Image (cartoon, rainbow, N blue to C red):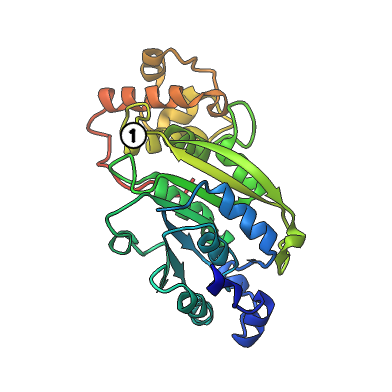
């Protein structure tokens, strides 16, 4: 790791490359090496692991991932200023850092991952695309996906939605999708003061472990049921599910859910049961499998 030790401080890198954070790119940089090291360690042992990092910016977390022993880091960065800064890290770690300039929402990293060892996604995600990226990864078909773990930074509000249990206002479509396909957990919070520039919110690091065998149902059916139910979350299901079926009462009766229940009270397995019953009762209405839209 001696090569990494020769790199200049991150603030010097930002100054030399004119890397002032852009709000349009959702940039908030983590420059505290103790924090970036803590995040990298939270991703688990990295020896032999290829890490996909989205939005590395000046490379604070990138350095930490390499220092913790990642076999390779594939960094996806949209900002050409940051791409130039990351090239300095690549020179210090020959063959271990590949920087791809592009939009992570439109880019398939598969051709860059190689064929050996596990793949893990670890990132301080740009806030403005964080939820859309997560939904895309959780919507991967077939399942289990190409990654063995997600360790991601979100605004605290989004993190709470990911892990929320039924019964509260944070529980919604994102909660159901994330908990259906993964076991999510908030690991720790990071205050706004740790970032440059500081955002207006607290951030949280979330780990999502893919379930090898989620409860069986089609993604497209689950997406349609949750979109209908939470689209009118204040209404009883007998009303909100009318966008799926003119008369949703037989659907609710088939899975033992009360018509007077509301979406936020239904657990994940209840929504899976509804999705399966909907596919069976209205096959002509069930859409082909598609990537879910952001909740």
At a point 64% along the width and 66% down the height, the residue shown is 28
At a point 39% along the width and 15% down the height, the residue shown is 255
Q: Is residue 190 left or right of residue 100?
A: right
Q: Position of residue 100 (x, y in %)?
A: 40, 72
Q: In which image quadrant can residue 26 be found?
A: bottom right
- Per the image, the residue denoted by label 1 is 221
Quadrant containing the N terminus in the rendered view? bottom right
**Is residue 172 among what the camera can see?**
yes
Q: Position of residue 169 (x, y in %)?
A: 64, 34
Q: Position of residue 243 (x, y in %)?
A: 40, 34
Q: 194 or 107: nearer the eye?
A: 194
At a point 31% along the width and 34% down the height, the residue shown is 218
User: Residue placed farthest to the right in the image?
Assistant: 193
Helix, strand or loop at label 1? It is helix
Label 1 Cα crowd, 10 Å radius (few <14 / some 14-19 / many 20+) = many
The relative height of residue 12 versus residue 217 in the rendered view (above or below) is: below
The relative height of residue 29 versus residue 170 in the rendered view (above or below) is: below
At a point 46% along the width and 72% down the height, the residue shown is 93
**Is residue 231 among what the camera can see?**
no
């Amino acid at each position: 790791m001696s090569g990494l030790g020769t790199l200049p401080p991150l603030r010097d890198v930002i100054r030399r490359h004119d890397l002032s954070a852009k709000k349009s790119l959702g940039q908030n940089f983590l420059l505290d090496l103790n924090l970036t090291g803590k995040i990298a360690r939270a991703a688990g042992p990295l020896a032999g692991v290829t890490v996909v990092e989205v939005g590395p910016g000046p490379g604070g977390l990138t350095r930490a991932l390499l220092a913790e022993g990642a076999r390779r880091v594939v960094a996806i960065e949209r900002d050409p200023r940051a791409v130039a800064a990351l090239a300095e890290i690549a020179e210090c770690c020959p063959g271990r850092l590949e920087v791809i300039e592009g939009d992570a929402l439109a880019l398939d990293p598969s051709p860059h991952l190689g064929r050996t060892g596990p793949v893990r996604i670890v990132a301080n995600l740009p806030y403005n695309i964080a939820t859309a990226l997560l939904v895309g990864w959780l919507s991967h078909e077939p399942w289990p996906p190409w990654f063995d773990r997600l360790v991601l930074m979100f605004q605290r509000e989004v993190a709470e939605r990911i892990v929320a249990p039924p019964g509260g206002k944070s529980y919604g479509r994102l909660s159901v999708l994330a908990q259906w396909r993964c076991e999510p957990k908030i690991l720790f919070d990071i205050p706004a003061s740790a970032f440059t520039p500081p955002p207006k919110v607290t951030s949280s690091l979330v780990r999502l472990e893919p379930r090898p065998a989620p409860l069986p149902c089609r993604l497209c059916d689950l997406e349609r049921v949750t979109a209908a139910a939470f689209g009118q979350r204040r209404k009883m299901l007998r009303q909100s599910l009318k966008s799926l079926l003119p008369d949703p009462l037989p659907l609710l009766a088939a899975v033992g859910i009360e018509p007077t229940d509301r979406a936020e009270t239904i657990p994940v397995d209840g929504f899976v049961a509804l999705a399966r019953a909907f596919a069976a009762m209205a096959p002509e209405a069930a859409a082909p499998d598609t990537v879910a839209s952001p909740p």
